[in-house]
Image (spheres, helix red, strand yellow):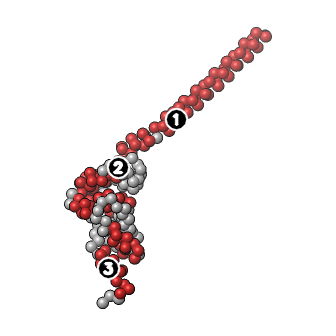
Amino acid sequence: MIPRRFLPTAIAFALALPAYGYPEFQQFVKKNSGRGTNCAMCHLHPDGPEGLKPGQIGSLSTEEMNQLNQARAAFEPGQNVSNPILNAFGNSIIGKLGKTKFLQIRMHPEELPAALGDMSDLDHDGISDAQEYLAGTHPLDDSSGEPSRLLLINLRRYAFHLIMMVVATGAGLYGLNAILHWFDVLMSAARDKEEGNG
Ligand SMILES: [Ca+2]
């Protein structure tokens, strides 16, 4: 018999037992993108939720276990989910879809991008979370993205700076030319005067 004071922890632990990552998503991403990916796309720890390391279930405090169970009970969509074993992308998926829909989609991981939509871009690199999932790049790392897309996005983002740089360089060159020209005119005027005097 478990002493009464340990009951909440024991219940929380028992509820936490069927805790597996969902490798279907990872397998789909690998196949679809050709990029190797690990559990860290959605979980805090790259090895997934099982274990004793930071971000894994075995390392959670009682309070975090309660958070975990609350997050697991977020069946309806549109909730603010804060699961201590998930990263911001993992939490945003459960928050947006709800656990029920998420578990349905698990059998069709190719449907996740459509379910997420293209509105969310958690790392603000210009590529939506859903597109990063498809491309096997990290939705929380703004230096991780399809290289050609990142380049285009950055060119667009920094277009103003690039134009200003060209203008400034041009103006600098023009300014220098103008000064040299002015100096030239001055010198030849002085020469003419000297010749006139001589
Ligand atoms: Ca992004």
Label at residue 104: none
Mark 3 is surrounded, within 10 Å at the Cα level, by few (under 14), some (14 to 19) or many (20 or more) other residues, namely few
Given this view, does label 2 or label 1 mark the residue nearer the observer? Answer: 2
Q: Nearer the viewer, residue 104 or 193?
A: 104
Residue identified by numbered label 3: 11
Q: Which amino acid does the dot numbered 3 rest on?
A: Ile
Residue at disc 1, secondary structure: helix
Task: Indicate whether 117 appears above or below 48.
Answer: above
Q: Quadrant of residue 9?
A: bottom left
Mark 1 is surrounded, within 10 Å at the Cα level, by few (under 14), some (14 to 19) or many (20 or more) other residues, namely few
Q: Nearer the viewer, residue 80 or 167?
A: 80
Q: Position of residue 174 (x, y in %)?
A: 58, 26
Q: Quadrant of residue 18?
A: bottom left
Q: Quadrant of residue 196?
A: top right
Residue at disc 3, secondary structure: helix
Residue identified by numbered label 1: 164
Quadrant placement of the C terminus: top right
Question: Which residue is depicted at the point 27% across and 53% down?
Answer: 115
Whether label 3 lies within 8 Å of ligand 1 gets the answer no
Residue at disc 2, secondary structure: loop
